Amino acid sequence: MLKRKYKENFCNFALDKGYVLHFLIIFNSIPERFGNENLGLCAVLIPLLSCGGLASGNYSRTHMKETENKYTVFTLPNGMRTVCWHTDGLVSYIGIVVNAGSRDESPSRHGLAHFVEHTIFKGTRSRKSWQVSSRMEVVGGELNAYTSKEETMVYTNAPAGYEERAVELLADIVSSSVFPQGEIEKEREVVIEEINSYLDSPSDSVYDEFEELAYAGSGLAHNILGDAASVRLLTGEDCRDFIDRHYTPSEMVAYCCSPLDPEKVRRLMERHFGCLCFPAAPRLRQAPPPMSPFNLRHDRGNHQANTIMGARVFGRKDPRRFALYLLNNYLGGPCMNSRLNRELREKRGYVYTVDSNVSLMSDCGLMMVYFGSDPATVEKCRRVVLDEIDRLAQSRMSDMAFEKVKRQYCGQLIVSSDHMENRAMALAKSILYYGEINDISTTAECIRSVTAEQLREVAALLPPSGFGTLSLV
């Protein structure tokens, strides 16, 4: 639904991106794809980290628990979980995150998860397309969605007081979308234009092409959008089948950040979502095979070389992720004092943009470095990147320097905490992926517990021989 890169997101990513910031907020938007964006431009939000829960998501209808941070988590009888964040704000943020993305498509239906996210707003059994799209807008709100490799988010915001309008609308489009043929045909052309727009942007498309190589042989390899040929094959029946298989109560988590009393939220959710009974389909995800290192250059007639270097890492639940987040933020985070910005831009003048990001999936992940440079300096830049990582792997950072790295990260967490909608989304994703809620103080505690030796050990997992490099020139 959203234009991917600068409408990002949030983000997932990632996925857990590894920045202190989790979601891109550029141009007042949310990411459509985690793992495929230039994060050096972003202002973002907290990562979905797990380090000891504040609230468990395993509650029945009658068993509700409120944490000291005003989070309430409950589970409907059908297995759908909801996290409430009771606030005194003037805006309500309500949405649903689904444990389904492009990774869950069949080989013959690439782009289906994203196509569903576009067409789910095109009419239900009781509403026309224009009625769906205007339902929240007529009260000053918004209805939108994004797709990543492992999740889909459908979300709303509106002035406080319209919570039932939002919950009822979300339930209607999830349970009753009809995917009219005429709307399908029009939206198909919209999506193909979106695909073409990224083909014209090498700084975007280099991420897609790199992931095709890094995840070759798995459902993570293909572009979230699919390609023009695959999108032309998708039908309304495909869309409905994808929802029936994957938008099941046990694989969805709702969030509500609102002044509305949590007990009233529970009643709203039960009224509108309690009837959902799609049975859970078997999860078919398989870990991708190991990545074979590569160093490729594709000539596209560009003035600038857009380069991605990356190596495979562990998944989002690995306890070493905290050290990896710190390493990533130190190397190529969004601040001007990142190591690679200093070495490649400030000291040598090789690049205009350089950043690194971490994209963690359920069973694997990638750490990637992006830079845009003159084609003649690509190899020099590549050597600097590898040398910086190797330096961190060979010698432990001093205690004073490491404390500064952690202090910066924790400070960024606090600064990022003002973005209410992204924090609400992060709560739902935390429940979905970890079964628990982690707030900023808990995350900061986990970051502060990382040692300089643990950071060195994570850097040692990224030897030069393990990197793949792709340049679009």
Image: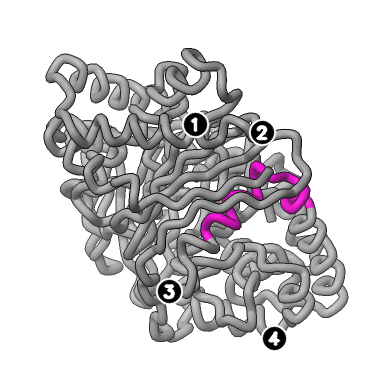
Residue at 65%, 42% (x, y): give it: 203
Q: Quadrant of residue 411?
A: top left
Q: Residue at x 51, y 42 (%)?
A: 10
Q: Position of residue 313 (x, y in %)?
A: 32, 54
Q: Which residue is mark 2?
A: 27
- Image coords of residue 218 (percent x, y): 46, 73
Labelled disc at residue 237? 4
Scheme of image coloration: one colour
Work out whether residue 217 or residue 173 is closer to the camera in this orientation and state it.
217
Quarter holding the N terminus is bottom right
C-alpha span from label 3 to label 4:
21 Å
User: Is residue 146 shown in magenta?
Assistant: no
At label 4, counting other C-alpha atoms closer than 10 Å, the crowd grade (few under 14, some 14-19, many 20 or more) is few
In the rendered structure, which disc, 4 or 1, sits on the residue that comes first in sequence? 4
Residue appearing at x 56%, y 35% in the figure: 378
Question: CB under 8 Å between callouts 1 and 3?
Answer: no
Task: Write down the residue under mark 3.
Answer: 249
Amino acid type assigned to the residue bearing label 2 in the image: Phe
- Between circles 2 and 1, the one closer to the viewer is 1
Q: Secondary structure at mark 1?
A: helix
Q: Could you say where residue 182 lies in the image, as x and y percent from the top left?
A: 87, 75
Front one among 210 and 442: 210
Q: Magenta span covers which residues?
A: 197-211
Instruction: Give the CA separation, mark 2 to mark 1.
Output: 30 Å
Per the image, the residue denoted by label 1 is 381
Residue 197 at x, y = what percent?
78, 50
Left/right of residue 52 with respect to residue 351 in the rendered view: left
Amino acid type, callout 3: Pro
Judged by depth in the image, the label closer to the viewer, 4 or 1, is: 1
Q: Secondary structure at mark 3?
A: helix
Residue 412: name its quadrant.
Answer: top left
